[in-house]
Image (spheres, rainbow, N blue to C red):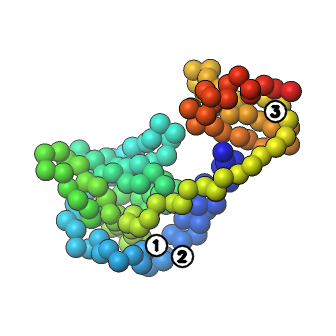
Amino acid sequence: MTTGKPRLRATGLAAVILAAGPAAAQDNSVWDPGTLPETKGIVKQYTLTPRGDVDGLILTDGTEVKLPPRLSGAVVFTVRPGDAVSVRGMRARALPLVDGASIRNEATGATLVTLGPPEPAADETVLSGRIAALLHGRRGEVNGALLDDGTTLRLPPHEAARLSATLRAA
């Protein structure tokens, strides 16, 4: 139940960190991605989650690089299709697949370290107000509500199904 503002803040913060230079994008975790195998290549395209977040890259040689979707904004500010990259991470044995721990743009030197804890879960938020309109997914299913004060309330599918009988526009 969020309005999307934390995601915008995180994306803006990633842009500021990356604009400050490659050294600012370094992670201070105890894990050293420099000890992991390195894969080099040219970015062919991004891979996307169903929500449209970048969760990886496809290199021109067909190698798939998996990255955390929580870093979607930072990834697109670090590398773009056509860029030469160096990726450090665990390689799959039988597939052209790398679980990326760090990615470096060879031309700019910008480095993104993906190790570290995931974003903390959003705090529970209590919202109140009149429902001005119900919000729907692509198949017409209710997936949230627009409150009369302009607040957008999004619900995961199981909660939307549970509350479908009580969610009504005023």
Residue 102, can we see it? Answer: yes
> Which x, y percent locates residue 57?
35, 49
Q: Is residue 91 above or below residue 127?
A: below
User: In 3D space, how far apart are the residues under numbered discs 3 and 1 (Cα atoms)?
Assistant: 42 Å
Label 3 Cα neighbours within 10 Å, binned few <14 / some 14-19 / many ≥20: many
Q: Is residue 95 above or below residue 28?
A: above
Q: Which residue is mark 2?
A: 20
Viewer-side residue, 60 vs 57: 57
Tag 1, which secondary structure?
A: helix
Amino acid of disc 3 = Ile
Q: Nearer the viewer, mark 3 or mark 1?
A: 3
First-in-chain label (1 vs 2): 2
First-in-chain label (2 vs 3): 2
Q: Is residue 22 above or below residue 76?
A: below
Label 1 Cα neighbours within 10 Å, binned few <14 / some 14-19 / many ≥20: many
User: In 3D space, how far apart are the residues under numbered discs 1 and 2 (Cα atoms)?
Assistant: 8 Å
> Which x, y percent locates residue 34?
26, 74
Q: Are marks 1 and 2 in contact (CB under 8 Å)?
A: yes
Label 2 Cα neighbours within 10 Å, binned few <14 / some 14-19 / many ≥20: few
Viewer-side residue, 118 vs 70: 118
Amino acid of disc 1 = Ala
Tag 3, which secondary structure?
A: strand
Q: Which residue is mark 3?
A: 131
Residue drawn at (74%, 49%) of the image: 126
User: Within the image, what quadrant is residue 39 found in?
Assistant: bottom left
Left/right of residue 118 with respect to residue 45 in the rendered view = right
Left/right of residue 108 with respect to residue 168 in the rendered view = left
Q: Nearer the viewer, mark 2 or mark 3?
A: 3
First-in-chain label (3 vs 1): 1
Q: Which residue is mark 1?
A: 25
Residue drawn at (33%, 51%) of the image: 66
Q: Are marks 3 and 1 in contact (CB under 8 Å)?
A: no
